Image (cartoon, rainbow, N blue to C red):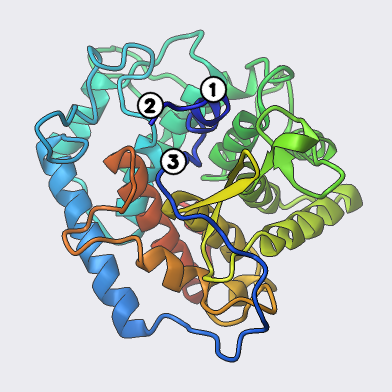
Amino acid sequence: MKINSKVAILTTSLATLFIFGGVSQHTVAHAATFQKASSKTIKSKTSTTYNYAKKMLAKNKNGFDSNAAAIFSKKAYPASGAADGYSDFLLGLKANGYKFTSAQKSLIRKNLVLKSNTDPAILSKAIVGLKSIGYNPAKYRPYGSKKDVNLVDQLYKSKISSQTTSTLSQVLIALSTGNYSRPKNATFSKTSLANSLAKLQQSNNGWAYDNKLADVDTDTSAMAVTALARAKSSAKTVKTSLSKGQAFVRSQASTNGAYGYNYLGKTYLNANSTAEAIIAFSVRSSTNKYMNSVASQKAQTASPMVAMLGYINHDGTIKGSSSAVYGVGQVNLALASYKSPQLHRSVYTIK
């Protein structure tokens, strides 16, 4: 299938999209029953996709077909040293209890590309990824270097005024993963960044990758909601934006509980969009129930958890996934997010 430029742009965000999802049907009669995922099913499906992710990391392979590329490789990914989605992939493993080996940490350090002018989006992902495998991004020694670098300071000093909505969300989420100090010569604060993100909210209460009302999508909106929640701002404008944003995400639920992106008048349901919605619902106690207990729409017949689990194949791969790193990684992260309220902390509070 030929990918339209709009879809191609959308797939560059932490919330990459699957172009092979189902098409949503929003106009059905009121649902008589609402299906929830059982603890047994959640545990079984989590084990399946988690074990597949472990095998991927052990082999450093983005899946296991004949054309599978490496996950971490400077040669394959000269700008970052890793496949898109690697930070969610690593955090998804970490949040589900994985212990990274010394060899795996070394592999990642050898390949990650970090320069003084690294793009804020790439830098944000590196902070999340390195924090996930046990390194302090504020005092990180790149492979082969003789001195430490402060990646957090570098991010704070970056120029972000012209960055996309997705990048602003990524930056805010990355800075929330630890108790980091802000340098005196920072170009922004978490508070100012949250305010900027709130101002980019469209009139329908969602967000768009290109800041156009016509292009508002669930993935960008769910990530913005997660970022605003992680900012923990007391500003009324941010709080209002967050509440409206979560209401928008709820309004986008399909009748079968899945989420998707809109293209040429149709909604293409997929695992990643559904995972993003679950993560967004996990960040506030008032919306935890929409992950698996309460319907967001009157016509909804199943929860987002039921829908997302339905995308997990028997071998742990994700149906319709254009990238195993993105598919498995983000589904694992959403599964960990579902458990996070029980642990009384977000998956992005990385210990």
Mark identifier at residue 5: 1
What residue sits 72% from the left and 41% below the top? Answer: 207
1 or 3: tag closer to the N-terminus: 1
Residue in front for this viewpoint, 215 or 188: 215
Find the residue positioned furthest to the bottom: 32
Classify 15 as above or below 115. Answer: below
Residue wearing tag 3: 19
Q: Position of residue 254 (x, y in %)?
A: 59, 65
Q: What is the spatial separation of the Cα atoms under label 1 and label 2, in whole angstroms?
A: 37 Å
Q: Report crowding for label 1: few under 14, some 14 to 19, many 20 or more residues within 10 A (C-alpha).
A: few
Q: Is residue 318 left or right of residue 255?
A: left
Q: Disc 1 or disc 2, which is closer to the eye?
A: 1
Residue wearing tag 2: 140
What residue sits 66% from the left and 59% below the top? Answer: 252
Q: Is residue 8 left or right of residue 230?
A: left
Element on which disc 1 rests:
helix
Q: Position of residue 234 (x, y in %)?
A: 83, 53
Q: What is the spatial separation of the Cα atoms under label 3 and label 2, in whole angstroms?
A: 37 Å
1 or 2: tag closer to the N-terminus: 1
Amino acid on which the number 3 mark rests in the picture: Ile
Mark identifier at residue 174: none
Q: Position of residue 176 (x, y in %)?
A: 58, 44
Q: Disc 3 or disc 2, which is closer to the eye?
A: 3
Q: Report crowding for label 2: few under 14, some 14 to 19, many 20 or more residues within 10 A (C-alpha).
A: some
Amino acid on which the number 1 mark rests in the picture: Ser
Element on which disc 2 rests:
loop
Q: Position of residue 229 (x, y in %)?
A: 68, 54
What residue sits 58% from the left and 27% below the top? Answer: 6
Q: Are marks 1 and 3 in contact (CB under 8 Å)?
A: no
